[in-house]
Image: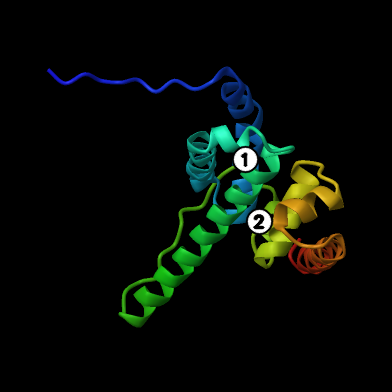
Amino acid sequence: MESVELVTSPPEYEDFYRREYPAMVALAAAVSGSFAAAEDLAQEALTRAFRRWGRISTYDRPGAWLRRVTINLALSRRRRLASEARLRLRLGGPPLVEPPEGDETHVWIAVRRLPARQRAAIALYYLEDRSVAEIADILGCSEATTRVHLHRGRTKLATMLEHDP
């Protein structure tokens, strides 16, 4: 008879998971544009953190690592879906369309239409109340670049919302 080994997580990872999961779902939804996929993206990011917990737990800010992974997963999903949609069009099939989702505000629908970095910066700033320095660290860019992403994102959102009430 084959023995089954259960994998248990250290208490500090469990606390990290409980603390970060809701924020990762919100971040993944804002960046990916899909509330339906957000939980899966957050779970995948947290699973990757679990696999590397021995190393990640030693970081000054393991949450920053988790946010970067969540953003990268969400952006990869968007690119993959766009690529699949282009292929379906080229092959003559109908475009892949996600079903409409409920409980979205008009603003977050507009945020979905922003370029990836602007979308991530806006989500981190407004959903998580992150500072420019923290966002720069998470996105792997300078604070000046982060301010540019935020400014351009706000400007585009103002234009979109003004024309699309």
Categorize mark 2 by other alpha carbons within 10 Å: few (<14), some (14-19), many (20+).
Answer: some
**Which x, y percent locates residue 162?**
82, 66
Q: Please tell me which residue is depicted at 25% across the width and 20% down the height of the picture.
A: 4
Q: Which residue is mark 1?
A: 24
Q: Secondary structure at mark 2?
A: helix
- In the picture, measured across the screen, residue 158 lies left or right of residue 41, that is right
Q: Please tell me which residue is depicted at 57% across the width and 18% down the height of the picture.
A: 11
Q: Nearer the viewer, residue 11 or 148?
A: 11
Q: Is residue 33 visible?
A: no
Amino acid of disc 2? Ile
Amino acid of disc 1? Met
Q: Nearer the viewer, residue 77 or 139?
A: 139
Q: Please tell me which residue is depicted at 73% across the width and 38% down the height of the picture.
A: 61
**Residue that protrudes farthest toward the left in the picture:** 1
Question: In the picture shown, does residue 164 fall above or below 59?
Answer: below
**Which x, y percent locates residue 88?**
35, 74
Question: In the picture shown, does residue 32 fall above or below 41?
Answer: below
Measure the C-alpha gap from mark 1 to mark 2: 18 Å
Q: How is the protein colored in the picture?
A: rainbow
**Which x, y percent locates residue 124?**
74, 48
Q: Which residue is mark 2?
A: 109
- In the picture, measured across the screen, residue 84 lies left or right of residue 44, that is left
